[in-house]
Every structure is written in structure tokens, then in C-alpha cells.
């Protein structure tokens, strides 16, 4: 004699079962590391992330958001990731690393800095929302040449990472 499962899935049992299933789905989604990729169509800035999630990534120069990648030789610009979430917290602190790599059009390294925050990488958990890296231009860069800039922010207490990549063009002062 076969029994049908349909009577069990009716009424109050179905409501409780449905709520339990939804709760489990929500909890499991929160424990999965978030990852993704975004691209700024104006600058070509590509941001890939896993574990650490930026709200928005952009390039600033002289306090303004850039919509291009022409950088006057000798100027600095900032790659910023705003409203970053997902840091691993230990004793109310977070620890962040920042690597900066610049290569020429042939892939020759001009700068390879593995940890710009070394020795000053621990911050109070509530004080860190934006991650910034200042990129200086100058010799050995040349006018009218393109350079690949990569900035990698890492969660030193966890496995989270944000990587920003952009190609800039070094120009004469406008």
C-alpha cells in the first residue's frame, strides 16, 4: 500500500517547511564568499573581487572622478574602492595589504611593490570603509606611452581580495 506525500505538505506543515527552507537558503547564501567583476566603461578600470566586495571602484585625480585615463607625466592619481565589505575581524581590527604593479607596453616592470601598507596594515574595524592607492607617475615613464597599472588589496586576516587593473596613457601637461 503506497502512501501519498501530498497530505503531509498541506496546511501548517507546508508553511513551517517553507519557512525553514527559506531560512536555510538565506543563511547559506551569506556564508558563500562573494565574488565578481566590474568594468568602468569610461576608464576601462576592471575590478575583480572575491570575499571583499567594493561598492564602487573609480579613479580620482585632483579631487575629481576621472572619465579618461590620460595622466599628465609627473601627476598622481588615486584608485579607490568605496564602501568595501567582507573583512575578517580579529579583536575589533582588520588587516589590509596593498600591492602596486606598473608595467610598460612590453610587460617590463617599472614598479613592483608587494605591500605598501607593510608595518601599518592594522585598522579599527569601523574606521576602514574605503581602500585607496595613490599612484605616482614620472621617470622612467615617457610621454605618449601606455602603462598597465594593477593594484591589489588583500584581507590579511582572511582570504578576501580586490584587484583593480587599468591602462593609463602618460601625456604632457595639458
Image (cartoon, rainbow, N blue to C red):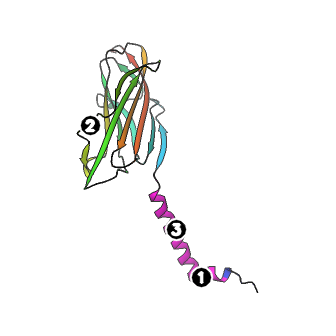
Q: Does the rendering let one see residue 104?
A: yes
- Could you tell me if the residues under marks 3 and 2 are in contact, i.e. CB atoms within 8 Å? no
Q: Mark 2 points at which residue?
A: 118
Q: Which one is closest to the eye, mark 3 or mark 1?
A: 3
Circle 2 sits in a helix, a strand or a loop, which is it? Answer: loop
Which residue: 42% across, 13% down?
A: 144
Residue 174: x and y in percent read: 34, 15
Question: How many residues crowd around disc 2 within 10 Å: few (fewer than 14), some, or many (20 or more)?
Answer: few
Q: Name the residue under label 3.
A: 22
Q: Nearer the viewer, residue 37 or 171?
A: 37
Is 87 placed left or right of 22 in the picture?
Answer: left
Does the magenta run of residues contain 110?
A: no
Question: How many residues crowd around disc 1 within 10 Å: few (fewer than 14), some, or many (20 or more)?
Answer: few
Q: Which one is closest to the eye, mark 3 or mark 2?
A: 2
Q: Which of 89 and 7 is in front in this view?
A: 89
Residue span colored magenta = 7-33
The quadrant where residue 114 appears: top left
The disc at residue 11 is 1
Circle 3 sits in a helix, a strand or a loop, which is it? Answer: helix
Residue 67: x and y in percent read: 41, 29
- For marks 2 and 1, give the CA distance: 60 Å
The quadrant where residue 134 appears: top left
Amino acid at each position: 500500500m503506497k502512501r501519498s506525500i501530498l497530505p503531509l505538505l498541506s496546511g501548517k506543515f507546508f508553511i513551517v517547511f517553507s519557512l525553514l527552507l527559506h531560512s536555510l537558503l538565506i543563511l547559506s547564501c551569506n556564508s558563500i564568499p562573494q565574488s565578481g567583476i566590474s568594468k568602468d566603461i569610461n576608464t576601462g578600470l576592471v575590478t575583480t573581487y572575491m570575499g571583499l566586495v567594493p561598492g564602487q571602484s573609480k579613479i580620482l585625480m585632483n579631487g575629481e572622478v576621472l572619465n579618461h585615463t590620460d595622466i599628465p607625466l609627473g601627476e598622481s592619481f588615486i584608485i579607490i574602492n568605496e564602501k568595501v565589505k567582507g573583512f575578517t575581524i580579529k579583536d575589533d581590527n582588520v588587516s589590509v595589504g596593498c600591492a602596486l604593479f606598473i608595467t610598460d607596453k612590453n610587460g617590463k616592470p617599472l614598479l613592483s611593490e608587494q605591500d605598501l601598507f607593510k608595518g601599518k596594515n592594522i585598522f579599527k574595524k569601523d574606521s576602514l570603509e574605503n581602500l585607496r592607492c595613490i599612484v605616482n607617475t614620472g621617470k622612467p615613464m615617457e610621454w605618449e606611452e601606455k602603462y598597465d597599472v594593477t593594484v591589489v588589496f588583500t584581507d590579511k586576516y582572511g582570504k578576501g581580495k580586490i584587484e583593480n587593473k587599468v591602462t593609463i596613457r602618460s601625456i604632457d601637461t595639458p
